[in-house]
Image (cartoon, rainbow, N blue to C red):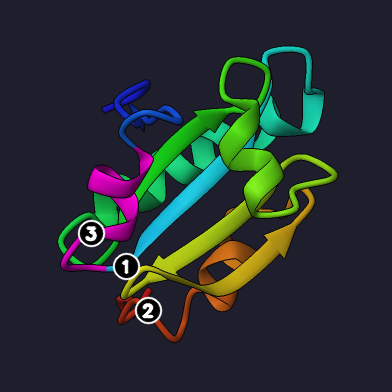
C-alpha cells in the first residue's frame, strides 16, 4: 500500500479533514523536506494498519500555504490530529513509527505485537 496516502488541499481541507467522522492525522510536509520523506513510510504503514480508526492525509505546505498558516505550522514535518473539527494533538518532527503510534494512543487501539 505504499504511496497511498491521500493528498488534501486548501480547497478541500474542511470537507476531508474537519468534517470527517473519525480522527484525521494531517502530515504537513514539503518535497524538499528530508525528515518528511523519512516518516512517510511509517505513516503509510500506520494508515494500512489503523485506517479503520484514523485517516491519514498529506498536505503540501508549498502548494497549500493558507491551511498551514491558519494552523500555525512553522516547522515540518508537523502532524496534527483533527477530531470534531479541532486540533486534538500536534506532533512535531520526525519520529520512528513506534513513537508516532504512542503519540496516537488516544486515537487508535494499538494492536498487540
Q: Residue at x 75, y 53 (%)?
A: 72
Q: Position of residue 106 (x, y in %)?
A: 44, 86
The image quadrant where one finds the C terminus is bottom left
Left or right: 61 in relation to 57: right
Q: Position of residue 80 (x, y in %)?
A: 56, 59
Disc 1 versus disc 3: distance between alpha carbons?
Answer: 10 Å
The image quadrant where one finds the N terminus is top left
Q: Label 2 near label 1: C-beta < 8 Å?
A: yes
Q: Position of residue 69 (x, y in %)?
A: 70, 42
Q: Label 3 near label 2: C-beta < 8 Å?
A: no
Q: Label 3 near label 1: C-beta < 8 Å?
A: no
| Viewer-side residue, 32 vs 8 | 8
| Viewer-side residue, 54 vs 11 | 11
- Judged from the image, the secondary structure of the residue bearing numbered disc 2 is loop
Q: Residue at x 30, y 76 (%)?
A: 111
Q: Where does label 3 land, which residue?
A: 19
Mark 2 burial class by Cα count in 10 Å: few <14, some 14-19, many 20+: many
Disc 2 versus disc 3: distance between alpha carbons?
Answer: 16 Å
**Comes first in the chain, label 1 or label 2:** 1
Mark 3 burial class by Cα count in 10 Å: few <14, some 14-19, many 20+: some
Per the rendering, the mark at residue 107 is 2
Q: Where does label 1 land, which residue?
A: 23
Left or right: 107 in relation to 55: right
Main SS, magenta region, reads helix
| Viewer-side residue, 107 vs 8 | 8
Task: Name the image quarter holding residue 71.
Answer: bottom right
- Give the residues in magenta: 13-22
- Judged from the image, the secondary structure of the residue bearing numbered disc 3 is loop
Q: Residue at x 36, y 68 (%)?
A: 85
Amino acid at each position: 500500500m505504499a504511496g497511498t496516502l491521500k493528498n488534501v488541499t486548501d480547497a478541500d481541507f474542511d470537507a476531508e479533514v474537519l468534517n470527517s467522522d473519525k480522527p484525521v492525522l494531517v502530515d504537513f510536509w514539503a518535497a524538499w523536506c528530508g525528515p518528511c520523506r523519512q516518516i512517510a513510510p511509517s505513516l503509510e504503514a500506520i494508515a494500512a494498519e489503523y485506517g479503520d480508526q484514523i485517516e491519514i492525509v498529506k498536505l503540501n505546505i508549498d502548494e497549500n500555504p493558507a491551511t498551514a498558516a491558519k494552523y500555525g505550522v512553522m516547522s515540518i514535518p508537523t502532524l496534527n490530529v483533527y477530531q470534531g473539527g479541532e486540533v486534538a494533538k500536534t506532533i512535531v518532527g520526525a519520529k520512528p513509527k513506534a513513537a508516532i503510534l504512542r503519540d496516537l494512543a488516544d486515537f487508535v487501539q494499538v494492536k498487540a505485537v
